[in-house]
Amino acid sequence: MKALARFKPKFWDHRDVAAGPYKHLFNFRRIWKMAVILTAGVTLLPVVVLAVIDYNVTRRSEEREIHLRTFRLVSNTRRTISFFLEERKSALGFIARDNEFETLNDPARLGVILDNLKQAFGGGFVDLGIIDPLGYQRTYVGPYDLQGKDYSDQGWYKEVVERGVYVSDVFMGFRHMPHLVVAVRCSSGGLSYVIRATLDMQRFNDLLSQLEMSGLGDAFIINRDGILQTPSRLRGKILEKIALPIPRYSHATEVFEQQNPENSSLIIGYAYIEGTPFILMIVEKKADLMKSWYRTRMTLVGFASASMIIILFVILGVATRLVNNMHEADQKRVMTLHQVEYSNKMATVGRLAAGVAHEINNPLAIINEKVGLIKDLFSMREKCAKDDKLIALADSVIASVERCATIARRLLRFSRSEEINIRPVDLKETIFDVLGFLDKEAEYRSIKVSVEVPESLSKIESDSGRLHQIFLNIINNAFAAVEEGGHIDISVSQEGEFVRITFTDDGCGIPEEDLDRVFEPFFSTKAGRGGTGLGLSITSGLVQELGGKIGVQSKVGMGTSFVVLLPFQTNKKEVEDGNASAPGR
Amino acid sequence: MRVLLVDDEEELVTTLAERLSLRGIDVDWTTDGEGALRLARRNLYDVAVLDVKIPRISGLKLKSELAKICPAMKFIFVTGHGSEDDFRAGTAEAGAGYYLVKPVGIDVLIQKMHEVLRGKEEE
């Protein structure tokens, strides 16, 4: 909270005294908020929208790419498998065409053909059998004793007779290796018979395992009951049922996405291999395929976030600075306005005072002379000269006249002209002049005022009228701050080329948080109690006009100390230049 | 010592004249510039005490007119108006010590007259 307070701009706590229809123009916090929200809105919104659009577009295109890739892989693999089986079916067809039925029934010849097949196709063919039109295995070459076996009642035999070709499910055959059976119906000289071969699945499995798939992809074949026909890396052993649902039939390659119970999506590509009970399936984890997209996404989100943070910081910085400048300019404007107003007021007061003093001085002079004459006449007549009472009365009138004259002179000194008049000023006399205005109040409230001015202090070159106002303002404040019976100490000391005047009171003091602001226009703790908050800002302005400085130290409950530093020599030109450059002059 | 008093306040100027006479000073008085010039043409004055503000003519203007008639005449200014501008112009014209603000004590006035005359004799 404290660190935040350090960054708090000046305008944040600005309490404007302005009222009326234009009040909103001076609500700097509101202006700042509007500026930040508006700028942030128009800059961040496009960034966010673009980022979201880009995110979705790239994501969709990446997904499409993955689907397409899987589709191609499934499609190509299906073709290969189809071709593999087709090749073997064709080989069986070729054997039938190349050899007469009778020739094939020669076990020696069939053995030669099987050997040739093994060599030509690189293994794979395990046995070969010729089944006559009645369904009996007439000739058989291979590891089993199947000679003469009757197949006529078996489903596959009926199917091959009916459809001309048959590919069986995979089964565990010779040496507990997975096998499948391919049978082809042939006709020779009006005779219809079947050539049947058992194929080793090893070649088949090799084909699938060689597929290039990212990391954890899985390619396998199931039959239409969902039984694995080839081993799968993740979905189970051969001849086990897979946990995945059997995809619906489609004559084309299909790719779909499936949500897993563990909340990870699977990309499943499949194809029904025509003329066989097989379904080729390629199953991949979507998360693996999307890895590169995740990296892109991280970059995209990171870049967007970083941009937004930078934009936000820039907006905050710029808005704060601008509004602060506005606030400062406004403060200066207000201060200038009020100084001008105050100057005018004081000039009017000055003219009034001068007029009154002048008008009073003449009758005072008459009274003075008349009483003087009376006194003269008395002192010349013997009888009256001895009447001390008469002389004392006359002296008392003269003393009163002198008192009036002093007041008039004080008024004249207090009134100041618009331009600065640099003359030698006796600080002690000035201070006592000002205190003269407050004598009665001090007396009534039993406030003790002590003044300490070194005898050796020389006169300073300054403007008497302004000094009067500066001192009067500060001493007035001190009077307002102290309780009945309080103390006010005024001390003057020399400090190099400056004279230091300290006004110390033992009044209520100023809270620390207000100390920096006491010289701001309209800052007042007496708001609503007759304080306009102009006194100290005007005082500070006047001190600056005279080339001096003003400072304040205070502790609540202990009192306040105002220090005014004034140069011994006020350079008139500098002062005027300073005024000329000051705004509003 | 012969003194000429000029002030538009008749009450003041007559009383002052009487008091000075009581102290053995030869005094003539008038309330306007024309009267002052008339008197100056007729008599020879050592000192003129002029109010800064006299009807129709300023004290300073009157001073130069009187000085033309009687170059040896010395001047003391009194004013009821202590404004800064008057003060500066007055002291420049009369010399710092001979510009007095009303009300002026009679003793101060006589002392100043002697001072200004001593200056004349020194010349």
Image (cartoon, coloured by chain):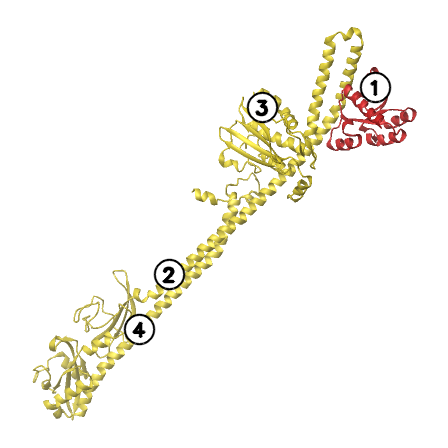
Q: Secondary structure at mark 4?
A: helix
What residue did someone put label 2 on?
Answer: A298
Q: CA distance from mark 2 to mark 1?
A: 108 Å
For the colour yellow, the matching chain is A
Mark nearer the N terminus (3 vs 4): 4
Three-letter code for the amino acid on which mark 3 is drawn: Val
Q: Amino acid at mark 2?
A: Met
Determine which quarter of the picture holds residue B93. Answer: top right
Q: Chain of mark 2?
A: A
Kindly identify the amino acid type of the residue bearing the numbered disc 4: Phe
Q: Residues within 10 Å of mark 4 (few under 14, many from 20)?
A: many
The percent position of residue A63, horizontal first and vertical second, equals 34, 67
For mark 3, what is the residue? A449
Can you tell which chain is drawn red?
A: B
Quadrant location of the N terminus of chain B?
top right
Q: Chain of mark 4?
A: A
Above/below status of A374 relative to A497? above
- Residue ID at (58%, 23%): A449
In the image, residue B26 lies at what x, y percent? Answer: 86, 19
Q: CA distance from mark 2 to mark 3?
A: 75 Å
Does residue A323 appear anywhere in the picture? yes
Q: Are marks 3 and 4 in contact (CB under 8 Å)?
A: no
Q: Quadrant of residue A228?
A: bottom left
